[in-house]
Image (tube, coloured by chain):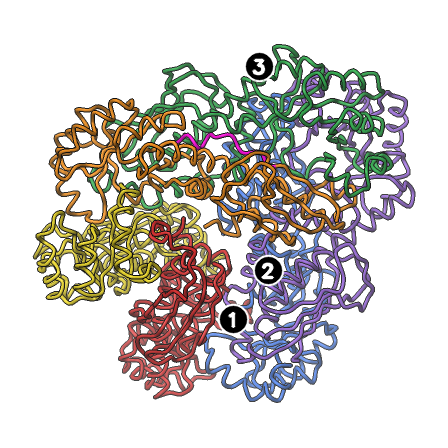
Chain colours: A yellow, B red, C orange, D green, E purple, F blue
Amino acid sequence: MIADALLDSWLDEDVPYGDLTTQALGIGDRPGRIRFVARSQNVVCCVEEAERLLARLGTTPRRACASGDVVAAGALMLEAEGLAAALHRAWKTAQTLIEHASGIASAMRLIVSAARSVAPDIAVECTRKNLPGARRIAVRAVIAGGGSMHRLGLSESVLIFPQHIAFLGGLSALGDAIAGLKRRNPGQKIMAEGWSIADALALATAGVDVIQTDKFPPEMVRSLVEHTRHLTPAPAIVAAGGINETNAAAFAGTGCDALVTSAPYWARPVDVAVTIEPC
Amino acid sequence: MIADALLDSWLDEDVPYGDLTTQALGIGDRPGRIRFVARSQNVVCCVEEAERLLARLGTTPRRACASGDVVAAGALMLEAEGLAAALHRAWKTAQTLIEHASGIASAMRLIVSAARSVAPDIAVECTRKNLPGARRIAVRAVIAGGGSMHRLGLSESVLIFPQHIAFLGGLSALGDAIAGLKRRNPGQKIMAEGWSIADALALATAGVDVIQTDKFPPEMVRSLVEHTRHLTPAPAIVAAGGINETNAAAFAGTGCDALVTSAPYWARPVDVAVTIEPC
Amino acid sequence: MIADALLDSWLDEDVPYGDLTTQALGIGDRPGRIRFVARSQNVVCCVEEAERLLARLGTTPRRACASGDVVAAGALMLEAEGLAAALHRAWKTAQTLIEHASGIASAMRLIVSAARSVAPDIAVECTRKNLPGARRIAVRAVIAGGGSMHRLGLSESVLIFPQHIAFLGGLSALGDAIAGLKRRNPGQKIMAEGWSIADALALATAGVDVIQTDKFPPEMVRSLVEHTRHLTPAPAIVAAGGINETNAAAFAGTGCDALVTSAPYWARPVDVAVTIEPC
Amino acid sequence: MIADALLDSWLDEDVPYGDLTTQALGIGDRPGRIRFVARSQNVVCCVEEAERLLARLGTTPRRACASGDVVAAGALMLEAEGLAAALHRAWKTAQTLIEHASGIASAMRLIVSAARSVAPDIAVECTRKNLPGARRIAVRAVIAGGGSMHRLGLSESVLIFPQHIAFLGGLSALGDAIAGLKRRNPGQKIMAEGWSIADALALATAGVDVIQTDKFPPEMVRSLVEHTRHLTPAPAIVAAGGINETNAAAFAGTGCDALVTSAPYWARPVDVAVTIEPC
Amino acid sequence: MIADALLDSWLDEDVPYGDLTTQALGIGDRPGRIRFVARSQNVVCCVEEAERLLARLGTTPRRACASGDVVAAGALMLEAEGLAAALHRAWKTAQTLIEHASGIASAMRLIVSAARSVAPDIAVECTRKNLPGARRIAVRAVIAGGGSMHRLGLSESVLIFPQHIAFLGGLSALGDAIAGLKRRNPGQKIMAEGWSIADALALATAGVDVIQTDKFPPEMVRSLVEHTRHLTPAPAIVAAGGINETNAAAFAGTGCDALVTSAPYWARPVDVAVTIEPC
Amino acid sequence: MIADALLDSWLDEDVPYGDLTTQALGIGDRPGRIRFVARSQNVVCCVEEAERLLARLGTTPRRACASGDVVAAGALMLEAEGLAAALHRAWKTAQTLIEHASGIASAMRLIVSAARSVAPDIAVECTRKNLPGARRIAVRAVIAGGGSMHRLGLSESVLIFPQHIAFLGGLSALGDAIAGLKRRNPGQKIMAEGWSIADALALATAGVDVIQTDKFPPEMVRSLVEHTRHLTPAPAIVAAGGINETNAAAFAGTGCDALVTSAPYWARPVDVAVTIEPC
């Protein structure tokens, strides 16, 4: 899912013409070993892509863990043998890739764990609010962290925002449209975002399958769950807005069906120690 | 510096085939206005690229600030008029671009300000440890935040790490090499990273132009400054490793010449409110 | 949704170095007009992209219809004025783009119309079995034809094929998995393909939201509809496999919820006459 | 001729982030086998590229036929062993590639065979009117079908259309130009399209090497052949416009030198059955 | 023919993140004017692409000549007004593009002129031996210089080298194949390279349309012309190998039909003076 | 540093659809051997990339030398075994790549040798004035030739041209700025170009680290060296403009620290003989 050409573009971004220091010191042809070791416990991500980066530069990597694994502080994650020029060229790209992706995965895992400690079957999803251009890494990390993607993009699912409703002339017009939407899109759940309990209930009554809240506090989500639970069919309730590892359990305890978070995207990268030595 | 094709690839990542919701509701052809408003004070970045994104989709944007500006909470940053289909298509890509880039810029600015409150002329630099593939955004944001880039990559400058020295057979061998390095690279400062005061002094004695510390606490940086200040020429001392807005002033107060940080890359994105309305 | 760089790659594929004939005749700088006229009634598609192609080459196009329009035989679809070199360079790429895309759209429209003459609200969807690399044109044409896409790809929706079930150990194992699937994917309809009435009923009983048939004849689809209609909630029934304009009405008459077809992808391109004249 | 990056872009178009169904069912790591079997006799094309697709995803493919081969109904074309996640990811892209390309190749073969049953040495060529962006597949399929390409694009050969002549001021002006064209382009045959017998004869008299007819019926082509056969040197006569498998023999029987067709591009894809099973 | 994305990639190659000097001096926002002036008479090439580069960076260029023009020493070729940051960013890419391309064009023009001073209608062609990746610039420059391309690549024309014949089992086998080749490729001249007069005559007798010599001196080319002139049809004779401006007239005087040269590709770039000033 | 996708794009540029001649002769499947032999002594470059090109096409290459090696006339540089279709497809791209890159490397080596025969430790650098798009080849060849790159681009180093100073209001304003530049860019040497001895001395007095001359004759460079040698710290003096193999020793004899040349970019490609034979 991360193509060779994308891996190469990352290497090129960091080292377009080789490591000048290695060249200037004349050490490029000496054999060595690079080792990536976790400085703290973390959920691993993109170590497979780091392995491929190393292999593309002619080194012989050996991977000691997989995306989704939890590694302990001090654990070897990945190592490779090859020429010093290649090891230095791969170093930072491989390291920052693992660090950032594992940081997202680790943060996602914390939120998932917090939520499922309270509601073991709850869906825990991450938004598409990644840095533009980074969605392939983002999706990989969210899944490694045990979560799932809320949406991959706008083209694949129907999620009606108030910003859409404004063009229809309001919620009442939407009500008229829902039945048609459902008939014409039998493979899609019809989702909508509500900005108040009243809006959310109106969406539920109109037949929306999934109602997503925007920055409701937990008690308000719970109230919405209670107001909609008896409907047939009852809409799924999805809590979104401001959810993170500190409040995920509280949101999960409301009885809602899913949590949606963006918080992992600004998680601190995990710290990976890198050694390079002759061998 | 961010090419049209890169902008298009970001849009394509998020909305490869149009906004299905807009299509399903049949509202794509209705005229509207999108507005991006700061929810809190922040240092702006990439609002020009967001403007270009909007223009590429056929809307008519108007930009109210520039990268590097400080905007107040509630300030309009950017707006555009166009068809609902285009506004919805641009929405999230433009928003997350501004949010992430401005988040980095704002964090950078805090570190720069903290450092320069103590040492007004100190250089404050950001590493190249951005998410792979994101260097163009990273550089833009670092500069918008008032900082500069430590290195753009490995091909352009000479920075000798212990990981290089290992292939030479140790510091003593490096000493022999320094004079040659300097003669053969008259346009380059010769930089090296030291892992102890003793190492750093050895590097200084060997004639290295710039000595970079790795995770020295401030007092240890200060000690190194004091030990090298009297040399002729005195090497520049650059503090790196674990520097952030909370300790930047302490590091700046050591008398060193530059701080190098990676912290802005995991700054929380700023919060930008987006409204879309018919017009 | 079709980026400038993609348009340019199409032009480059056909005319990497200019039209040698125009160059050899020395007529490149003479002003002229190109006109694209429908030879028969058809549903238009990609005339906007053809317009952009012409504009990218420096000509001044004027578009006389839009994707989704029905144009009569003899109707002008698009014209442009510019230098002969540019007009000849754009000619075949613009023409074949309109011809192929309008061919798909026209075929889709026939199937949609046939189906909806019997079942006015039925969903009529096209598969993702386009020529690899052509999905952006395919989606555009399906929508222009009044249909919708069954799936945009594999990453966005859950459709369980027997080829998946084989790895689970059979339908009974699937039954156990469905409830979990639904809880963990609240934004997704769970869809599955059945290869017999019995399989389909087992899927329905297991709680699948949407059951897709594979090459059932209409009477068999009708039977499945009758067997599942009374379930609460009743699964949507989607007929797929061998559906085209000649049998779409028969399938639509079965009471199923949606038809899925691949037939438009091998529709004959519409015939567009192109004239180029000095002006 | 179909680069790795193009293969990867096809996979990415269909499965940007993995098969969600496989992921949701938790079966991705189970070993399995995929088999592609012809449902009917056909001329194979792009099975090598399908093999490469499978190999790029880490499976171990085994190819049982080659582009240009005729396979019987029921024949195994290609199989691979690998993890379920990879097999499902490759499935549809590999299948539709083989189906579309083999469909074109099979249609081309029918036209070639029909023509050569009458005129064993006649050239049978396909136009460049493929779907924009698909020329590499198109050329591959035309050759697999036993035909050749009429032109690969506009930059490489001289084919004078009436749309060129219009800028010269008519056929008489062309006549003056032909001798110069021939001297300045000694490696090129000078080709021209005629819209009537009279035009074609004028082109022949002017010294054109190859005269291409546009939608002449066979008897008209025959008449042109008879009128030009005695010229020294006699121009080659190429029949184009509306040629397909039903009339290719009739056209070939006119004595012309080549047929040019676009019909294979809208041939129905061949039907390839795909099974995926644990192993 | 040189797409926007290619222009952008050239700018990116030279200035990925802006001109650091301009940034460090804080002068980027000051308005200025850039002027490109010929230091010597030359045949211009790629000044249009340089103009587009300047426009893409937001400056307002004004072009004073066109590809193919001869400009005098001291003549203004191109100028633009814009911000200093944009002018400095465009400077070297625009300058080296014009210098290299005009260097090739000027060298080509000298060879064409030398040849045509003796043989006014002779074709003068350039090989495809450009630096890999530079063919679009190469073709543009060859045409600007008044020449034409010998071949654009291997896929479009039939030129039989001894390296092909080796696989056939020698010239006699080729002789058997020629008639078939000609029938199956009626739009192609059959070309072949001869390494001796005897070989060349054998090729002529076999019916080859165009015979290309490899490093024959002029008198040997003349001899070949004399030996083949009386054949019906007489093959075109093309002299290739070691041809440049100093010997082009001698080769042209042999009576051959075309010259093929690679010499322009290593022509010295023309010298263009660039000034940048505030305005 | 030269990615697979770039190699593929070169092959595609030359042979987008296979070698038509090989196809027309029906020899593509015959096994053969290609050999690249130096016609004259030269410094080799890009033979590794040629090897990769050959391997990507399925042949089995064997490389007999490495970039930077000097090979004698008649020496085998590279050979490969594979099918005739692949050998013909790779031929010219591999050959012209080696010829052009080795031409640059050989010219660079001559200049380096000339300079170091007089000043053994002098830096000899090549400019960034390569053909746009060719920097990766250029850098590779400069290094193979024993030189180094003056600058890789504008974003990485500070080199103040008079074209920058014009926006500051003259040299005096620059003087005020230098101290700040140095403090804010501790990792950079501050370089500046002088157009006269007086300017250069003013730059030196202002504290510029490296002074680059523009087209000074050797005696003027020597004078500048003498005028600056006693300064503390003394600026490095870099001679640029018009330097080539004939005058490099004279410039090196001036006592300056570095030479900067563009001359290798228009060096004549080396001549590599290519044989292809059945085997």
Q: Position of residue B138 (x, y in %)?
A: 40, 66
Q: Which residue is mark 1?
A: B188
Q: Are marks 3 and 2 in contact (CB under 8 Å)?
A: no
Give the camera-side residue of C92 and F195. Answer: C92
Please tell me if label 3 and label 2 are on a single chain. Answer: no
Mark 3 burial class by Cα count in 10 Å: few <14, some 14-19, many 20+: many
Q: Provide the residue span drawn in magenta.
A: C262-272
- Measured in 3D between alpha carbons, the distance from the residue under mark 3 to the one under mark 2, in whole angstroms, is 62 Å
Q: Which residue lies under the disc numbered 2?
A: F147
Instruction: Count residues near mark 1 (Cα–Cα under 10 Å), then give few for <14, some for 14-19, many for 20+.
Output: many
For the residue pair A100 and F235, the one nearer the viewer reads as A100
Amino acid tagged 2: Gly
The chain containing the residue under callout 3 comes to D
Foreground mark, 3 or 2?
Answer: 3
Q: Is residue C83 visible?
A: yes
Q: Is residue A114 visible?
A: no
- Which of the numbered marks, if any, corresponds to residue D113? 3
Query: In this rendering, is residue D252 above or below D136?
Result: above
Residue C239 locus on image (x, y percent): 29, 30
User: Would you identify the image quadrant in which residue A60 lies?
Assistant: top left
* Disc 2: CA contacts within 10 A as few (<14), some (14-19) or many (>=20): many
Q: Secondary structure at mark 3?
A: helix
Q: Is residue D128 left or right of residue B245?
A: right
Tag 1 secondary structure = loop
Residue in the image at 30% along x and 49% along y? A157
